[in-house]
Amino acid sequence: MKLGYTIIYVPDVAQSLAFFENAFGLQRKFLHESGMYGELDTGQTTLSFAKHELGDMNFPGGHVCAHSSAQPLGFELGLITENVEEAHAKAIAAGARELAPPQQKPWGQVVSYVRCPDGTLVELCTAVAG
């Protein structure tokens, strides 16, 4: 078993793709002509976005919409970078909201947290030494 992709349900797939391209420098891999599903190239694991309407079709009981939740959902995307401060500032300039500024952790890693316009929680961090 291996992790193939992560799908985040969002109000507007094209807007989420554009935000992640602008804020984090990720490259678009695919956007379906319907605008209901799209992917970013992030290496071995694909980061995907799907419209909430697809979530409604897949989950008859509904789902929590991150963009309308007052607090971030209980998961995060971790993006590794050599310069957390620069990546953090770029994400804020692109429209993310700061949740925690860059901080040096006791184990040597630098970490910050931002919340994207679509509600996604992103950790920006240096690689864990080891």
Image: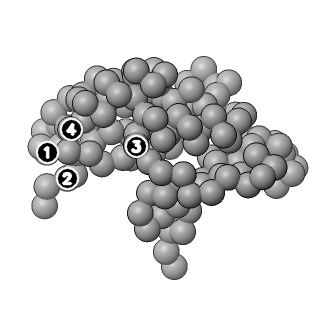
Look at discs 1 and 4 and give the one toward the viewer. Answer: 4
Residue at 56 percent across and 37 percent down: it is 18
Amino acid carrying label 4: it is: Asn
Q: Hey, which quadrant is residue 64 in on the image? A: top right
Q: Which x, y percent locates residue 44?
A: 43, 68
Instruction: Look at mark 1 in the image and give the residue it sits on.
Output: 107
3 or 2: tag closer to the N-terminus: 3
Q: Which x, y percent locates residue 119?
A: 58, 30
Instruction: Look at mark 4 in the image and give the residue it sits on.
Output: 83
| Secondary-structure class at tag 2 | loop
Instruction: Look at mark 3 in the image and give the residue it sits on.
Output: 25
User: Is residue 2 toward the left or the right of residue 64 in the image?
Assistant: left
4 or 3: tag closer to the N-terminus: 3
Residue at 81 percent across and 49 percent down: it is 34
Q: 10 Å neighbourhood of mark 1: few (<14), some, or many (≥20)? A: few
Residue at 44 percent across and 57 percent down: it is 42
Look at discs 1 and 2 and give the one toward the viewer. Answer: 2
The total number of labels drawn is 4
Query: How far apart are the alpha carbons under marks 2 and 4?
Result: 13 Å
Instruction: Look at mark 2 in the image and give the residue it sits on.
Output: 128
